[in-house]
Amino acid sequence: MSHWPLLSTLVFTPWVGALVVFALRNRLSDGLVRGFTLGLSLSTLALGACALAHFDPTVTGMQLTEKHAWISALKVNYHLGLDGLSLVLVLLTGVVSPLALFGTLRSVRCPAIYGALFLILQGSALGVFVALDFFPWFVFWELSLVPAFFLIKLWGGPGAARAAYQFVIYTIGGSAFMLLGFAALYAAAGTFDFVELAALARDGSLAMQLESVGGFWPQVAFLGVLLGLAVKVPLFPFHTWLPPAYAEAPVGTSMFLTGVMSKMGVYGFLRILWPVFPVPLQAAATPLLWLALGGVVLGAFAAMKQTDLKRMVAYSSVNHLSYCLLALFAVASVNRTGGTSAALASVALAKEAALSGYCVGVLENRSGGKRGLDDFGGVRSAAPVFAGFCGIALFSSLGLPGLNGFVGEFLIFRGVFGLAPWAAAVATLGLLATAIFLLTFWQRVFHGPAAGAGVSFRDLDRTEKLTLLPLIALMFLLGIFPQLLTGLINPLVTAWAVSLP
């Protein structure tokens, strides 16, 4: 196993599969295309499980590493590696991606092209989670935009074109600032390697090298990387691209955006900003806390005002991701529990985000495109199984004990309250607004007399049940045994916290 490039196989299998699916699109039936695409997507889960079997959670450094010279003149290396955080996100991708395909691929037009684009998107996300050199990392980061753009534009709703262009323009704009920041880092340190840059940051030499380039370059490098990541998460007020993109995206793509792609930005904060810029991050902690609180509170209140169910889920995603950033900004200096909570919550909250997006997609598909809060009524009577699954996702988002959402919220508030009680107090307004809009959704769509599209609403078929059951099972499993994740992440985050000044 030590000689087998497991991580390269993990990343490039979906890409190779995408090429094969596209090349054979006219030779295979739609059924074979769907089965082949799903099998290739499942390769991530299989290879991720293989990586988990060879992973030692007590080791805080990178494991299963691959490093080869790529562009010698620029000291660019093809460098891949895995730690507890990236392993959890790889496994998350391995779960969400095939379920998103399995539940939606049968109903999309041109399944070969859709499947090929989805596999490219999946491989790009995996590359972001395991690349340890900025050059290949940035290639994966930017390549993820291409399939996401076409999936939204070509298979999305009536406003899909505008939403897709807005998504790409925002993200590329943020990436331009990030590129400037890393250009400054390279000019100062002569390396793009995340591990080397983090080591230079720990002993203080990186800051001195940046100051030697120019007195303002430490701030420029930090702000550039911060803006690039802030747009991707997104951090308030850079969130305006997200609601239309999530609302107009097809259901499977929306599941991937909420369940995986949004975590790329949080991962970037944990992989790059925290280890490479510890001192500037500490200095900017208070204003960043306020911005995170803006996403927590205003995101929840914006969701409360929505009548479009997909936009409600989109603003709910802004709220949930802002909780992760709130914990990270509150404990960027010295708090192990809070750091763990941010990393864990970014994964724990992903399950109900993807499941909620799928449930809203079921409502939309069953009703001929309707997705308004007032378009349904009494769905529980006609579709009790669907109502039960959707209810579990909603109550997990509310933080019901026994479900994964409770674990994430508890750890976040425990960590934040210990360092910034005022921030935790303000953030509870977001919890209140979340309870209001989720319970309003639950009451008006599923309860009361049958009305609108709720009349004779068809319950879930076997494919839809098989799509939702694994997500439901994981929500209970992680809610009851959160140590399955914390055991992988805790040693890593503890080592990061100790290394910070």
Image (tube, rainbow, N blue to C red):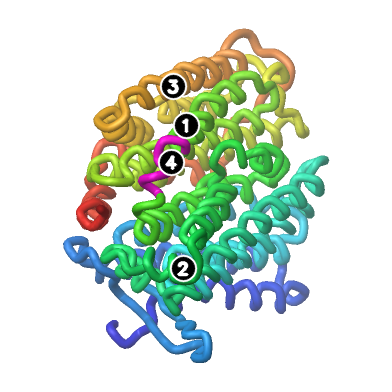
Q: Residues within 10 Å of mark 3 (few under 14, many from 20)?
A: some
Q: Which callout, 4 or 2, points at the residue further toward the start of the chain?
A: 2
Any part of residue 454 in sight: no
> What amino acid is labelled 1 in the image?
Trp
Q: Is residue 114 above or below residue 326?
A: below
Q: Secondary structure at mark 3?
A: helix
Q: Which callout, 3 or 2, points at the residue further toward the start of the chain?
A: 2
Disc 4 target residue: 325
> What amino acid is labelled 3 in the image?
Leu
Q: Is residue 490 above or below residue 379?
A: below
Q: Secondary structure at mark 4?
A: helix
Q: Secondary structure at mark 1?
A: helix
Q: CA distance from mark 3 to mark 1?
A: 16 Å
Q: Nearer the viewer, mark 1 or mark 2?
A: 1
Disc 1 target residue: 290
**What are the residue bounds of the magenta stretch?**
281-287
Q: Position of residue 496 (x, y in %)?
A: 26, 56
Disc 3 target residue: 431
| Quadrant of the rendered image containing residue 251 | top right
Disc 2 target residue: 43
> Residue sitting at 25 percent across and 36 percent down?
480
> Residue sitting at 35 percent across and 23 percent down?
422
The answer to whether residue 387 is left or right of residue 271 is right
| Quadrant of the rendered image containing residue 283 | top left
